Image (cartoon, coloured by chain):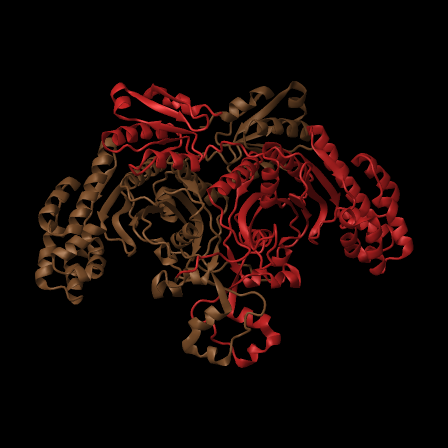
Chain colours: A brown, B red
Amino acid sequence: MAQKPSIPKGTRDFGPEEMIKRTYIFDTIKSVFHTYGFLPLETPAMENLSTLLGKYGDEGDKLLFKVLNSGDFFKGVDTADLNEEKRNLLATKICEKGLRYDLTVPFARYVVQHQSEIAFPFRRYQIQPVWRADRPQKGRYREFYQCDVDIIGSRSLVNEVELIEIVAEVFRKLGIRITLKMNNRKILYGIAETIGHADKMIDITVAIDKLEKIGLEAVEEELSTKGISEESIAALRPILSLSGSYSEKLAALHEIIGGSETGVKGIEEMETIFALTEKIGTDLDIDLDLSLARGLNYYTGAIFEVKARDFAIGSICGGGRYDDLTGIFGMPNVSGVGISFGADRIYDVMCGLNLFPTDSGMTARALFLNLGGEELTASLIELKKLRSMGIPCEIYPDNAKMKKQMEYANRRAIPYVIIIGSDERASGQVSLKNMVSGEQKTIPTDALPEYLAVRE
Amino acid sequence: MAQKPSIPKGTRDFGPEEMIKRTYIFDTIKSVFHTYGFLPLETPAMENLSTLLGKYGDEGDKLLFKVLNSGDFFKGVDTADLNEEKRNLLATKICEKGLRYDLTVPFARYVVQHQSEIAFPFRRYQIQPVWRADRPQKGRYREFYQCDVDIIGSRSLVNEVELIEIVAEVFRKLGIRITLKMNNRKILYGIAETIGHADKMIDITVAIDKLEKIGLEAVEEELSTKGISEESIAALRPILSLSGSYSEKLAALHEIIGGSETGVKGIEEMETIFALTEKIGTDLDIDLDLSLARGLNYYTGAIFEVKARDFAIGSICGGGRYDDLTGIFGMPNVSGVGISFGADRIYDVMCGLNLFPTDSGMTARALFLNLGGEELTASLIELKKLRSMGIPCEIYPDNAKMKKQMEYANRRAIPYVIIIGSDERASGQVSLKNMVSGEQKTIPTDALPEYLAVRE
């Protein structure tokens, strides 16, 4: 096999350097989730195709990775099934399982399957990879992690408030300055109803969702092609142009869509959420963005989206309230609210803004040089002491040339090299070389932990 | 959809309770890996089938989960390919990718693919799920985690010694008393050579590997059916019956297989490993088990296997030295040594011996009752303070009946309930109820962190 091996397009290896950074992001997020009383859940990578199909629209069905049945997978297939028009049917005949496409459907499936064991309201988070047979391109992968946190089984708006706090806390800890954009699907419905097109709410939200990207004029053009009358478009214009704080926008909105019962409900929800958030105290930049719609049609109340303020990239976190996630599996009327953190984009923002800590706490603080013989034994004994104190360190396994061992320390970015030669051994000392400054000194062996603990 | 949803056979959901325990095991293992200078690697779930096929024998190839190509997967298939005899060929025509079967082959693939970026010796660990289309049965799953740690690119026996220390440290931290069984493939070869059957080393190791399970007599019967002569079997008997400490066994072995150059090399390797381990100091129970063979044929030197001393279950950790892992991908002569921790079995041992800590540090310490109105606001403010100190706690989101809220705390095993009613609010106090003892007292709000920090 002369050819260098490779991995499937759209997938990635994460080497130690990337893993340290990714672990830092996930650990930070998890620690916040834990203080908010959320606990982890994991579901299998493979779900029955019957669980996945029909949940993500026709386009989504096409993007599901299907897993070939084991054994004689072709048994039961007859020539009529081989018609090119029937590829989807053939696929389901030879594949019973698929890789999960997101964490939401497996979560709904889990809740329905385990409803009798779960203490509702159920607070769970889930950090696992998902797979989509999308065309790979920059920033879009066929395997990527999702990081979801949801409370299911409670209609209380306290949950929305807690998610806002979680967003604030996670990004404060990561050092990313953000704007939290919020809106409410009920307000969007109220707007559609007020302008006389309650029936075209989806078309309207899809169009205004593009406001930031394509501008007001293009949005209005799209609305026109969808059969929204000129009058309605004119009525929508002042709403989309509302400015000011969220309180000002909500007050103005009340005047405009006050005739829509659902719209008013949406306004009141946002008033409650914002009032409670303010009372508890927050320094978060929150914006009521009436053009925010979020594509997923299962949202029914408040919706969230987070943008980094100092780095140009799409949303790095988003979510919302849904009233019927588990209905698709026969368990209706279970309301929930959740958000999802976009780990890959957060990674890009943190790299771009240089926000990762220089010392992860995971990499070795020191490398013992290997001089062989009794010096090796002495080094291994000291090494063991340092490790028992939780100080990560290692020894070069081979008694190789000094230069080679030093080069290894440099390539691994290990900050200190420790040398125990026969002189040092005789005097109970070690030579400690700072690999950044190049400075080398002889110190008592007992002083090692103190020196290594200092992070520069 | 009236039918309750389910998951594919052989796969599992891990709910919060299991996840807390599994996380405890993985975090403990990782923390030890870090102090030994190992860093994490992750590879994609899907590999090209060409990477996986032919690496695990015919039986392994059958157990690979194959992923159907996206788009028109059946293009290029002609009727000749549909012959029942050609199922494997058809599978590779419609599937280019498969799910990883273990972490070893992807690791070898990664090392070859990234050889120019890696600082050798390369110390990595990898904790990820693998998939096998095995017949599911008790303790055997189609998706399970492997937890591998390897040093590749060094022949030094210091690496074996470090792995022994890692084994000792991981199980000491987990609280599992173990016996580490060791042997050496070179010794096994030396034995085969000495009894005149160097050509039948595989048959001999496969047979004696079953010694513990089926007994000496059955092993000798199997050897006989494999064409090993009576004389050879008689020569093998005293070797398998060797008893005593590892030093005694090695000395005796020297007498018996001293004529085999490879055998002597194996003895010397073990002497070096044991001597260094003793010098550094260990309280580990190490046994030289000459019947230990480990099935995987890529091992070439020391081999390891760990048994729990207080719980009857198969090996919970194992591994060994391999001299040519990356040769299959065109990069010969790279020696490595590694071990793999069996997370599922470790989980079973710890459950069986009741070794998990009662407080994981992940679950909420307290639930604030939700009394609505200004009491809710006051509760949310105190809740936020506790969380900012890193104390996990939560509030019942709905202003439901007290009984319902208390039941939730009980079902979630939250140890404390905090009540801020109008009286408490007026006096700057909270009512704190211990959900285990039932005791309730009123304390100053400021004293809360202190009370909640005490772990009983």
Residue A423 on image: x %, y %: 66, 22
List x then y, in percent, for residue A257.
12, 51
For residue A250, side relative to residue B133 (left or right):
left
Considering every residue shown, the one lying at the far right of the view is: B231
Q: Position of residue B68 (x, y in %)?
A: 49, 66
**Residue under the point 65% across and 64% down:** B58
Left or right: where B10 falls relative to B443:
right
Residue closer to the observer: A100 or B353: B353
Q: Nearer the viewer, residue B286 or A389?
A: B286
What number of labels is visible?
0
In-image side of A134 versus B420 (left or right): right
Q: Quadrant of residue B449?
A: top left
Residue B122 position by quadrant: top right
Residue B454 rendering spot, x and y as whole percentages: 45, 23
Instruction: Decide if residue A45 is on the left or right side of residue B64.
Output: left
- The residue sitting at 60% across, 42% down in the picture is B348
Quadrant position of the C terminus of chain A in the picture: top left
- The quadrant in which the N terminus of chain A is found is bottom right
Q: Is residue A429 visible?
A: yes
Q: Nearer the viewer, residue A210 or A183?
A: A183
- Name the residue rendered at 20%, 36% in the picture: A275
Residue B269 higher or lower than A382, as above or below: below
**Can I make out residue A373 in this image?**
no
Q: Residue at x 33, y 46 (%)?
A: A339
Q: Is residue B400 above or below residue B140?
A: above
